[in-house]
Image (cartoon, rainbow, N blue to C red):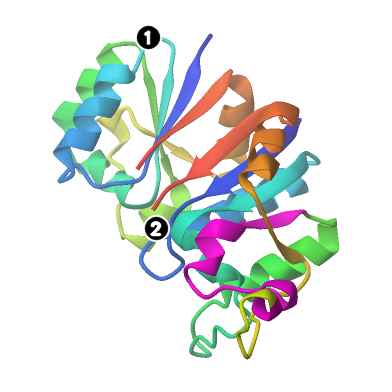
């Protein structure tokens, strides 16, 4: 059983990020959407999650709207809207953190 | 696969209604079924046809309206959340003796039973919060 987690708030909402991080299990996927994509700027956070065997994506349209370009070695992958659908299907359920 | 969509976020103070719209559109384009879109909390404001955004802004009510007509979507607005925010269909406007209504098909007012049914009948429920 794996879960897709979406997170739509910037890391300045630290309690939400903390709660989400605690709920992530190995094999889960985290998709950063809306202001959540600002989390890509915090390499230590994403590196910690990726090290725990969790795939991390950021939604392309939200990155573009905020002028964020991912560095190649961040370990965060860019997801299109179609990828969002695919990830919702590949995982058994979707949990939204907001 | 059968999806249902639950939206909480305000159309004015959050991106939820817009993200949910893009998600729904992508799911339909990929050939999936969207069983129901349920507007809850502040998101009910997006159903009002009295919204008159600036011309250079997206009219999210119109976008949902067109998508629903094209794909025969079930757009349900939570009736309790709607009434307290002045979002009324003709029946409720009459019942509460109000001079106007601002909801029309394909949007419809209904209760939480519709959300429960959607959860039971769908493979995935995807929530877009405010």
| Left or right: where A32 falls relative to B7 | left
Report x, y in % for residue B82: 55, 65
Question: In front: B92, or A69?
Answer: B92
Label 2 sits on a secondary structure element that is helix
A58 lies left or right of A39:
right
Q: Which mark is residue A97?
A: none
In the image, residue A52 above or below residue B23: above
Residue situated in front as seen by the camera: B126 or B19: B126
Mark 1 vs mark 2, CA separation in Å: 29 Å
Say if mark 1 contacts mark 2, CB within 8 Å.
no
Considering depth in this image, is B97 or A63 the residue closer to the camera? B97
Residue A26: give its label. 1
Q: Secondary structure at mark 1?
A: loop
Q: Specify start and end residues of the magenta stretch as a single range.
A: B74-94
The quadrant holding residue B39 is bottom right
Instruction: Give the mark nearer the N terminus: 1 vs 2.
Output: 1
Q: Are marks 1 and 2 on the same chain?
A: yes
Write the residue at 18% across / 44% down.
A13
Q: Position of residue A96 (x, y in %)?
A: 43, 36
Quarter of the image for residue A39 reads top left
Quadrant location of the N terminus of chain B in the rendered image: top right
Circle 2 residue: A64
- Where residue B76 sits: x, y (%)? 68, 56
Residue B116 location (% of width, % of height): 65, 35
Which chain does the residue under circle 2 lie in?
A
């Amino acid at each position: 059983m794996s879960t897709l987690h979406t997170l739509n708030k910037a890391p300045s909402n630290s309690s939400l990020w903390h709660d989400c991080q605690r709920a992530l299990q190995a094999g889960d996927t985290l998709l950063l959407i809306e202001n959540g994509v600002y989390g890509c700027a915090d390499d230590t956070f994403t590196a910690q999650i990726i090290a725990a065997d969790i795939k991390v994506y950021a939604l392309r349209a939200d990155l573009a709207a905020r002028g964020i370009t991912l560095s190649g070695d961040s370990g965060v992958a860019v997801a299109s809207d179609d990828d969002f659908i695919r990830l919702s299907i590949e995982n058994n359920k979707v949990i939204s953190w907001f | 696969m059968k999806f249902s969509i639950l939206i909480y976020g305000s159309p004015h103070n959050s991106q939820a209604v817009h993200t949910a719209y893009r998600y729904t559109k992508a799911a339909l384009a990929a050939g999936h079924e969207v069983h129901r879109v349920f507007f809850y909390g502040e998101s009910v404001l997006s159903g009002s046809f009295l919204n008159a955004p600036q011309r250079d802004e997206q009219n999210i009510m119109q976008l949902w309206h067109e998508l629903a007509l094209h794909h025969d979507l079930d757009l349900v607005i939570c009736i309790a959340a709607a009434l307290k925010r002045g979002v009324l269909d003709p029946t409720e406007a009459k019942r509460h003796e109000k001079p106007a209504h601002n909801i029309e098909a394909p949007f419809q007012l209904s209760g939480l039973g519709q959300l429960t049914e959607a959860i039971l009948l769908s493979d995935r429920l995807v929530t877009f919060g405010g």
